[in-house]
Amino acid sequence: MLLTDAGPLVAAAATREADHAACRALLRDASRPIVVPQTVIAEVAYLLSSRIGPHAEVAFARSLRDGELMVEPVHERDWQRIANLVETYVGLPLGLVDASVVAIAERLGQTRIASLDHRHLSVVRPRHCERLELVP
């Protein structure tokens, strides 16, 4: 399983992104399933549409429909943790989407997260491990 934030999904589709090749290889070679938190979906769709075009957004929607990416819902109990994380790291700021990735990683017991947001996520101290392994 690979839990992913928006950055690698967008970079894998955007050939001009500096991290394109690394993100494409990461997603291609990742253990399945590739899990996308529900809160990340709108961010990815917006970035794909605005940076690449509607065809990229359609391809993303199809990858969700076809099960290439698995959507992980935010559970009711995750919202308290998300709020706590946003409040704890308000100075970063962490933000709701990144906090949801951390909360879901904690719930699923995942320590490895695909993210290009190392600046924010490397500071967060999750409950279930000393630190998150951020790839690529």
Image (cartoon, grey):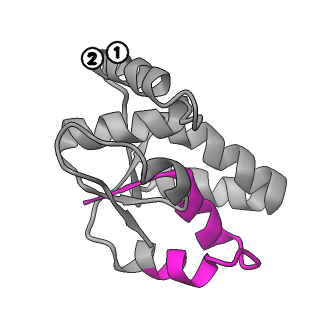
Mark 1 sits on what residue? 80
Q: CA distance from mark 1 to mark 2?
A: 6 Å
CA neighbours of label 2 inside 10 A, class few (<14), some (14 to 19), many (20+): few
Residue type at mark 1? Gln
- Asked if residue 125 is positioned above or below residue 32 in the image, the reply reads above
Residue type at mark 2? Arg
Magenta region: 1-25
At 24% from the left and 55% from the top, the residue drawn is 111
At 52% from the left and 74% from the top, the residue drawn is 23
Residue 3: x and y in percent read 35, 54
- Asked if residue 123 is positioned above or below residue 2 in the image, the reply reads above
Cβ–Cβ under 8 Å for marks 1 and 2: yes
Look at the image and say whether residue 135 sits in the magenta stretch.
Answer: no
Q: Is residue 53 visible?
A: no
At 81% from the left and 59% from the top, the residue drawn is 51
- Asked if residue 136 is positioned above or below residue 37 in the image, the reply reads below
Mark 2 sits on what residue? 77
Name the image quarter holding residue 46.
Answer: top right
Comparing 97 with 76, the one in front is 97
Residue 18: x and y in percent read 68, 78
Q: Secondary structure at mark 1?
A: helix
